[in-house]
Amino acid sequence: MSSISNTRVFNNPAKIIEGWYWAMPSRRLKRGRTCAFTFFGRELVLYRSESGRVTALDAYCPHMGAHLAEGKVEGEALRCLFHYWKFDAQGKCAEIPCQSECSFVPPIQAWHVAEKYGLIWLWAGYEPTHTLPFVPELENDECETLLANRFTKACHPSVMMINAIDAQHFNSVHHLPVNLHLEPRIRNQHCIEFVNTTPVLRTSIFTRFLSRFYKRSLTYAICYFFASTGTVTIGPDFLHFHIMFALRPTKDGRSEGQTILITKKRKGIVGRLWSFILLLLTRLVGAYFAKGDTLIFKTIRFNLRTPIKADASIVQFIQHAEKQQTIDWGLPVEESSKTDAPRLKLLSKLGSQN
């Protein structure tokens, strides 16, 4: 019981799991433009270089603290608007207009970014140890995507994530024609998958007809990454729908989310049209399962005090989240003694000249 009642990481607004988190739609950041972005209380600047590459740096210039989102993009670098100091994509000061010496300037912390599914993603950590979230069934395929609703909920992302594996909730509220039994499959320390193993109940004319479209069990699978982003696969054997729910935590324990509709990329005009139709149908599927649940996450104060057998998947999810690595996402990295020495030497030189 202690493993779920006294959690260190799960539902903890003071912790952030090391991993990929969505930042903003790619279309929002045009080539040669900057954008201010705050993640978990940390202020960043994102900019797209003239070649199209996205860079993420801590937001403030180490000279006098100007916000770099006010600056301008030059090639692959970013120039501060206040005194025109230029920083490269690694955060290193590359130029100070009024002098040749700039090695004393401490580098700005740079963060790993990637683009996929029409979104810019940020790695909360220093070196990525896992790929971007994906739909297991489509892992090796090119995909078509459509950004659906964006939302904010008054609870932690890990609490929202468990809704998709709450068997009792689905059986009681959504009246699925199956008694869900979700089997956990741990892919690695960052990723856990739950797959239904039970068949459609043949209790009525409708469910007997429905069972013809499923060979063994009702297709319902959820794959979680970093306890904050999840992909859902559902549908008959001949037609699966795929939805990704990308969430990021806020400093005050809320969730900022983006829904992504995903389908396999198809060739030709007819194929592209069919993919577009499937994405629209996927939107309807997602809306059905979200209906009513959103109200719960406006007021919930999650505390699993009385777990029952039907909560097994939730307990397994919590235990997996507890084993994941967290990062201290607090203050910017302090200057090391190596960068302090030339800075102090230059200040002393400047002072003696006055």
Image (cartoon, rainbow, N blue to C red):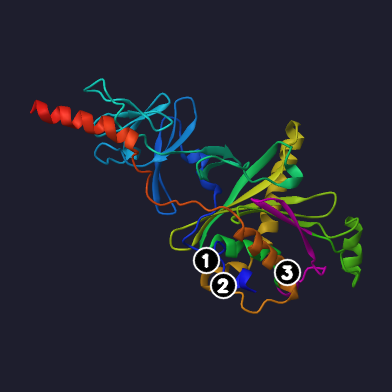
Coordinates of residue 18 in the picture (x, y in percent): 54, 49
Total numbered labels placed on residues in the image: 3
Residue at 24 percent across and 34 percent down: it is 82
Estimate the spatial distance between the alpha carbons at disc 2 and disc 3, rounded to whole Å: 16 Å
- Between 300 and 173, the residue placed more toward the observer is 300
Extreme top residue here? 100
Residue drawn at (56%, 72%) of the image: 302
Q: Is residue 194 above or below residue 261?
A: below
Q: Secondary structure at mark 3?
A: helix
Alpha-carbon distance for marks 2 and 1?
8 Å
Name the residue tied to disc 1.
Answer: 155
Q: Dot 3, crowdedness within 10 Å: few (<14), some or many (≥20)?
A: some
Q: Position of residue 293 (x, y in %)?
A: 62, 68
Q: Secondary structure at mark 1?
A: loop
Residue highlighted by disc 2: 302
How many residues crowd around disc 1 within 10 Å: few (fewer than 14), some, or many (20 or more)?
A: many
Image quadrant assignment for residue 71? top left
Q: Residues in magenta?
A: 171-195
- The residue drawn where x is 46% and y is 58% is 250
Q: Mark 1 and mark 2 in contact (Cβ < 8 Å)?
A: yes
| Residue with the mark numbered 3 | 312
Residue 30 visible? The answer is yes
Residue 185, image quadrant: bottom right
Left or right, 126 with reference to 65: right
Q: Nearer the viewer, mark 2 or mark 3?
A: 3
